[in-house]
C-alpha cells in the first residue's frame, strides 16, 4: 500500500502515548495500533478528524503517499 501512516512521529512530537491518544479519541488501542503499524486498509473520516483534533495537525501530517515499484494504480472498483 503506497499510503503510510505517520502516527508514531506525531505521537513522539506531541510526547503522547498511544494509550492517551486512544482515550482522547475514543478508539481502542488495538485499532490505533493497526493504524500505526500500517496494517489498516481504511480509516474513517470521523476517526481521522478526531486524530487531527487531538494531535493538533492536518490529515497530511498523518498520511503520506509513497508510490514504489509494483504499486498498482487504483482501478474504478477500488475507488467506489
Image: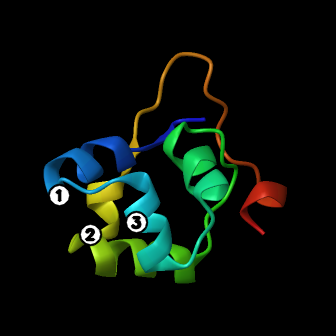
10 Å neighbourhood of mark 3: few (<14), some, or many (≥20)? some
**Element under disc 2:** helix
- Residue 26: x and y in percent read 55, 79
Cα gap from disc 1 to disc 2, whole angstroms: 7 Å
10 Å neighbourhood of mark 1: few (<14), some, or many (≥20)? few
Q: Is residue 31 above or below residue 33?
A: below
Q: In percent of the image, x 33 and y 74: which residue is there?
A: 52
Q: In percent of the image, x 62 and y 18: which residue is there?
A: 70
**Residue identified by numbered label 1:** 14
- Residue 30: x and y in percent read 65, 52
**Residue identified by numbered label 3:** 21
Assess whether mark 3 and mark 1 are in contact (beta carbons under 8 angstroms). Answer: no
- Residue 59: x and y in percent read 34, 67
Cα gap from disc 1 to disc 3, whole angstroms: 10 Å
Q: Dividing the picture into quarters, in which one does residue 37 lie?
A: top right
Quadrant into which the N terminus falls: top right
Of labels 1 and 3, earlier in sequence is 1
Viewer-nearest residue: 46 or 72? 46
Quadrant into which the C terminus falls: bottom right
10 Å neighbourhood of mark 2: few (<14), some, or many (≥20)? many
Assess whether mark 3 and mark 2 are in contact (beta carbons under 8 angstroms). Answer: yes
Of labels 1 and 2, earlier in sequence is 1
**Element under disc 1:** helix
Assess whether mark 2 and mark 1 are in contact (beta carbons under 8 angstroms). Answer: yes
**Residue identified by numbered label 2:** 55
Q: Is residue 68 above or below residue 36?
A: above
Amino acid at each position: 500500500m503506497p499510503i503510510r501512516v505517520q502516527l508514531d512521529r506525531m505521537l513522539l512530537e506531541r510526547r503522547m502515548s498511544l494509550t492517551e491518544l486512544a482515550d482522547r479519541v475514543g478508539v481502542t488501542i488495538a485499532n490505533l495500533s493497526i493504524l500505526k503499524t500500517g496494517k489498516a486498509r481504511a480509516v474513517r473520516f470521523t476517526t481521522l478528524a478526531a486524530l487531527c483534533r487531538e494531535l493538533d495537525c492536518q490529515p497530511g501530517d498523518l498520511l503520506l503517499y509513497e508510490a514504489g515499484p509494483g504499486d498498482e494504480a487504483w482501478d474504478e472498483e477500488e475507488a467506489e
